[in-house]
Image: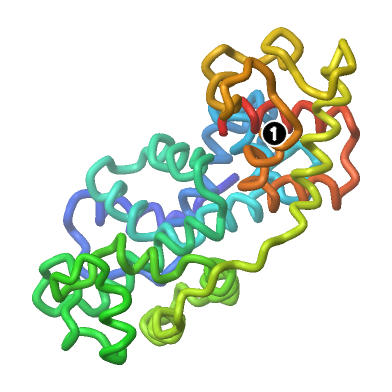
């Protein structure tokens, strides 16, 4: 995979402090995506398999949007979208190598893509409006109503920090994700964020948790050797640490409700697998992997 020599030269100039103007947004994330594939593509098929990368199975599966067992350039670019600033800073400090920062960004398995976008939008909202560079926002630095500002300012110190802004987006992550997916990274996030933060935080409607329920029930059916409807530590095939974390009532068994509660946060991830009709063996492996990392 050939990297545009002009971009490579500009990258080198930035790394050595010789350039003074920025590149178009998306340049660094796209360059990092191309380089990550080039640096790890052992069989030279312009895609990456799980054995060619140092990512967890969960992170790999999240990036493999079409579920074909490979990550291509398009999927890489999507995964790194909106990460220009972090990658650019890394280029400036490290030069041409981006494997460490790219692996770090791709390997995030704690947050969903929507959460990552919401976290990014919160940080950018502060950066775009923080006139006094204090790291937080006063009421005169934002275009929020006094009511909305007071509601968001939970510690009542007259400023909004990143945690308070992120909390104000709770339940609205999908709107932020839609903004970014619609090429919102190329414009200011202030207008979108202001509209969302102005809204009263509404508890998300309880979902049926269809896919996490299916996954939990299937996991029990597959592992319940004595047929009592729950799993012992031996039956669950989990580490002691993972089992104890999932066993919230500490009765020495994992019930369907405990597994459902643990998997509910992964509803969207599981939904992708079910909707794509992957094999039951793959689903079982994926569910097991999720339970080990919940």
Q: Quadrant of the N terminus?
A: top right
Place of residue 215 in the rendered image (x, y in percent of width and height, measured from the top left): 80, 38
The residue shown at (87%, 11%) is 226
**Position in image of residue 84 (x %, y %):** 39, 60
Quadrant in which residue 124 is drawn:
bottom left
The image position of residue 217, as x and y in percent, is: 83, 34
Q: Quadrant of the C terminus?
A: top right
Q: Determine which quarter of the picture holds residue 278.
A: top right
* 178 to 6, vertically: above or below: below
User: In the figure, is residue 20 to the left or right of 208?
Assistant: left
Q: Nearer the viewer, residue 83 or 264?
A: 264
**Helix, strand or loop at mark 1:** helix
Q: Which residue is mark 1?
A: 259
- Residue occupying the far top of the picture: 234
Closer to the camera, 108 or 215? 215
Instruction: Give the total of numbered labels.
Output: 1
For image coordinates 68% across by 39% down, the residue present is: 61
Q: Position of residue 218 (x, y in %)?
A: 85, 32
């Amino acid at each position: 995979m050939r990297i545009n020599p002009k971009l490579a030269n500009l990258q080198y100039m930035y790394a050595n402090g010789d350039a003074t103007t920025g590149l178009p947004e998306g340049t660094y994330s796209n360059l990092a995506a191309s380089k990550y594939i080039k640096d790890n593509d052992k069989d030279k098929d312009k895609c990456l398999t799980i054995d060619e990368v140092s990512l967890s199975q969960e992170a790999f599966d999240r990036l493999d949007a079409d579920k074909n067992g490979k990550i291509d350039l398009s999927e890489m670019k999507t995964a790194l979208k909106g990460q220009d600033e972090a990658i650019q800073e890394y280029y400036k400090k490290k030069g041409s190598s981006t494997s460490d920062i790219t692996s770090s960004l791709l390997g995030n398995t704690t947050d969903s893509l929507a959460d990552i976008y919401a976290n990014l939008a919160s940080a950018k909202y502060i950066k775009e409006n923080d006139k006094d560079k204090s790291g937080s926002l006063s009421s005169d630095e934002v275009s929020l109503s006094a009511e909305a500002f007071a509601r968001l300012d939970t510690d009542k110190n007259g400023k909004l920090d990143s945690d308070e802004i992120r909390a104000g987006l709770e339940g609205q992550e999908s709107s932020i994700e839609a903004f970014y997916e619609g090429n919102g990274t190329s414009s200011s996030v202030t207008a979108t964020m202001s509209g969302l933060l102005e809204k009263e935080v509404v508890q998300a409607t309880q979902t049926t948790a269809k896919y996490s329920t299916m996954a939990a029930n299937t996991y029990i059916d597959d592992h319940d050797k004595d047929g009592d409807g729950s799993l012992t530590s031996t039956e669950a095939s989990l580490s002691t640490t993972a089992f104890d974390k999932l066993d919230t009532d500490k009765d020495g068994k994992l019930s369907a409700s405990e597994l459902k509660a643990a998997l509910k946060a992964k509803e969207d991830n599981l939904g992708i697998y079910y909707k794509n009709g992957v094999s039951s063996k793959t689903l079982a492996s994926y569910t097991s992997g999720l339970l080990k990392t919940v």
